[in-house]
Image (cartoon, rainbow, N blue to C red):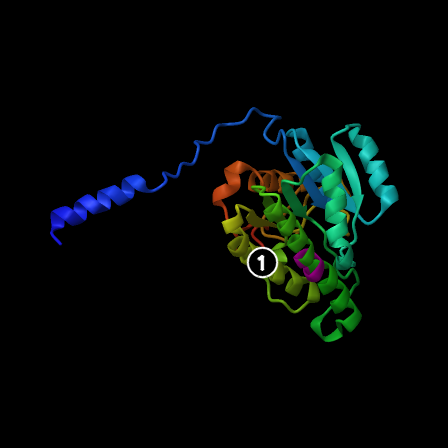
Amino acid sequence: MGLGIKSFLRSIIMYTKEEKKVPILRNPIAGHEFEGKVALIAGGSGGIGLAISKILHKSGCKVIIAGTSKTKLEEIIKTFNSKNVSALVLDYAHPESFESKVNEAVEIFNKIDIFVSSTGIHVDRDGLDFLNSTIEEYDSIMGINLRGTYFMCQQIAKYMIESNIHGHICLVSSQSALEPSWSPYRLSKLGISGITKGLAQRLLEHNIIVNAVGPGPTATGMQKNYDGSNLYTNLCPNNRYTMPEEVAEVVKLLVSDIGDTIIGDTVYMSGGRGVIDLR
């Protein structure tokens, strides 16, 4: 077959193929970036999760705040004083309940576009070391931080795929994932990095974007030495705690359409710890 005929046939094939188009992104109006969107924030009653809930709500998103304490959730919902904020009792220790819990969340605002997993626990005791970590501590941390996250994301992904939703999933990890994993907590956060990449790869074909954010020491109740009046700390090279609101700003980017080209990444906000220095 001559080159001329090959070129002609190639042109015919190109013209008969369906043309794919991606619309140009437009800058949203501030305060309306997430209008029409619904977000489910697991661990939304905690320091980082609550900051995320607030910033998404302020940006026009309907928000479902999930946590283990019904009483605490009810008190938090009152502070929003908004019909666009609701609560869901959700416990990562019981993955067998996740399917019904996702269905319950969907019924609140009729859909879920964004899922943020900010649920996690750690061992809070002096003298913790690899040589004295217990089986009970290991199992509880892995059960919540890894098993709970994995299977909750599974149910969310199933819902988004079945509902044909261009969704966003963001996992709240930790800079501990960058450090040697001698503790169950560090190991669990290293696992979150793997889950983030794996889900991003597996779900991209379904138009679901998955990323994570990895804060370093953050000014929340988890930090014994933070008293609310001084951000100084010697726990990281920049000598200050990260604010929950700063983490929330990064999560807001990751779950927005602007973040669609960030795929399978963990954005670390470590103050340099684990990146340019180890403790």
Residue 55 is a magenta residue = no
Residue at 75% from the left image edge and 33% from the top image edge: 85
Label 1: few (<14), some or many (≥20) within 10 Å? many
Decide if residue 158 is on the left or right side of residue 263. Answer: right
Decide if residue 98 is on the left or right side of residue 236. Answer: right
Q: Secondary structure at mark 1?
A: helix
Figure quadrant of residue 125: bottom right
Residue at 72% from the left image edge and 47% from the top image edge: 102
Location of residue 248 in the rendering, given as x and y in whole percent from the top left corner: 64, 40
Disc 1 marks a residue whose amino acid type is: Ser
| Residue 208 vertical placement versus 110 (above, below) | below
Location of residue 186 in the rendering, given as x and y in whole percent from the top left corner: 65, 63
Location of residue 86 in the rendering, given as x and y in whole percent from the top left corner: 78, 36
Q: Does residue 153 show up?
A: yes
Location of residue 174 in the rendering, given as x and y in whole percent from the top left corner: 63, 54
| Residue 30 vertical placement versus 179 (above, below) | above
Figure quadrant of residue 96: bottom right
Residue at 64% from the left image edge and 65% from the top image edge: 187
Q: Quadrant of the C terminus?
A: bottom right
Figure quadrant of residue 121: bottom right
Decide if residue 54 is on the left or right side of residue 33. Answer: right
**Residue bounds of the magenta highlight:** 146-150
Decide if residue 139 is on the left or right side of residue 264. Answer: right
Q: Residue furthest bottom?
A: 131
Q: Quadrant of the N terminus?
A: bottom left
For label 1, the residue is 193
| Residue 194 vertical placement versus 6 (above, below) | below
Q: Does residue 46 show up?
A: no
Q: Residue furthest top?
A: 29
Q: Residue furthest right?
A: 71
In terms of secondary structure, what is the magenta stretch mainly?
helix
Residue at 74% from the left image edge and 46% from the top image edge: 103
